[in-house]
Image (spheres, grey):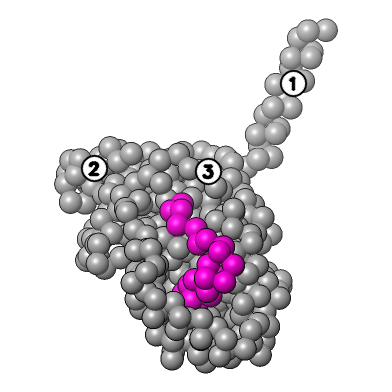
Amino acid sequence: MRKSGSIDLPLHYGKAPRWLFEKMKLLSKSISEIILIESGKDFFLERLSDPFWFQCFGCVLGFDWHSSGLTTTVCGALKEAFRSLGDCGLYICGGKGAASRKTPQEIESIAQRLSKPADGLIDASKMSAKVDNCALQDGFNLYHHTFIFTDDFKWAVIQQGMSEEGRWARRYHWHSESINSFVSEPHKGIVSDKNFITVNMVDKDRDELREFVAELSWRPGMKNLKDLLILKESIDRLPARHKILLSDINPKYVDKIFLKTYENKPKDFYSLLSLKGVGAKTIRALALISDLLYGEKISFKDPARFSFAHGGKDGYPYKISLSQYQKTIDTLSGFVKKAKIERSDKVKALKSIYRFYNCYNR
C-alpha cells in the first residue's frame, strides 16, 4: 500500500447545511464531467480511490478539511450528481448507515441494466467491509460504505469507521486494480492515524498467521474453547496488549462459531472471513490461540500512518463565499459545454488544418 502521509479526522456530528450540499452537488457534477470527458472513467475511479486526492476534492467542494463529515457528504453529493449525468459508465452505490446496507441491491439493479452478473461486485463490496470490520481491528466500526464501479466492472470502495470513545473517524480506500489479495495489504490507503492498538490480520508479512488461523478453525470447538479459557485464566501473565485483546471475548459466545467453522472447514483465511457469523472476536480469538500454540505473533502494525479553494462550512480556514462558489460552478459548467463539442467536429477541423498545411507546403 502506498503511504504518503496521514490526516486526522475528528468525529463531527450533524449534517451539512442544505445550501452547501446543493452547491456541492453542482460543483462535483461539473468537475466529474470534465474529468470523464478529458481522462475517462478509469482515471476518475483511480482518483476517487486515492485518499489524499479525495480529501483535496472534498476541500475544493467547501467541506472542512479535518472533518469526518467530508467523507459522507462528498460521497452523497457525488451519488446525487451522477443521477443527472446519464449513463456515463460509472455508477455509485451505498452511502451512510441504512444506505450502506442497500449496496448489494443497488449493484444488482445496475448490473441487470448492463445485462451482466453482479455476483463478483457484490462479493467485493461485502468482503471489503468484512476486512475493515473484522480483519483490521483498529477500534473503528464502519458506518459508511460507498461502492463505485465502471461498466466493465472495475471498482473502488470508500468506507469510514468511527471510534466513539476517541471521537475520531478513519477512512478506508480500495481500488480493484491495485489488489492482489483481499487478505494481504488490500487497501489503496487509509486516512487518520491515532494511537489505537490495531490487530492487523491483513498485514502482508503475516501469511503464516492467516494459515494457522484458518487451520485452527477446523479443530473441534471444545479444543479451541479450552485454549481460549487457558488464555483468559492466565491473563495476568500475558503482555498488556493481549489483556486488552482478550477483555471483550466471552468464550460461551464464540463456542457456537467454533462449531460452525469446524463443520464447514474453511479452506483458507479468505474463506473463513467470508463465513457468515465469523466476526472480529472470532478472528481475534483464533489469532490469540495461534500465538499460544505456535508462537505466531499477531501483527500490531497500523496501516494508517488542501482546503483553501472555497473555505469550509464551519468558517475554517475562512467562511465560504456563496458568490465565489457560484462563479466556480458557472465557470466549470462553461468548460463542460465547450468540452462537449462533437468529437467529429473536432476531427473535421483537425483534418482541414492538416490538408491546408500539406497544400501550403507542396
Q: Which one is earlier in the sequence, the residue at label 3 or at label 2? A: 3
In this rendering, the label closer to the viewer, 1 or 2: 2
Residue furthest to the top in view is 362
Please state, as top left, top right, bottom left or bottom right, where the C terminus lies in the image.
top right
Residue for point 59% across, 58% down: 206
Is 57 or 245 nearer to us in this picture? Answer: 245
Q: Is residue 217 left or right of residue 171?
A: right
Q: Which quadrant of the figure has residue 211?
A: bottom right
Residue 303 is situated, as x and y percent measured from the top left of the image, at 46, 52
Residue, disc 3: 2
Mark 1 and mark 2 in contact? Answer it, CB < 8 Å: no
Residue 290 is situated, as x and y percent measured from the top left of the image, at 56, 70
Q: Which one is earlier in the sequence, the residue at label 3 or at label 1? A: 3
Residue 311 - label: 2
Q: Is residue 342 left or right of residue 190?
A: right
Q: Amino acid at mark 2?
A: Gly
Tell me how far mark 3 sits from mark 2, CA to CA: 29 Å
Q: Amino acid at mark 1?
A: Tyr
Disc 1 secondary structure class: helix
Mark 3 and mark 1 in contact? Answer it, CB < 8 Å: no
Is 281 or 171 nearer to us in this picture? Answer: 281
Residue, disc 1: 354
Disc 2 secondary structure class: loop
Q: Is residue 32 above or below residue 132?
A: above
Is 15 or 359 nearer to us in this picture? Answer: 15
Residue for point 48% across, 76% down: 285
Disc 3 secondary structure class: loop
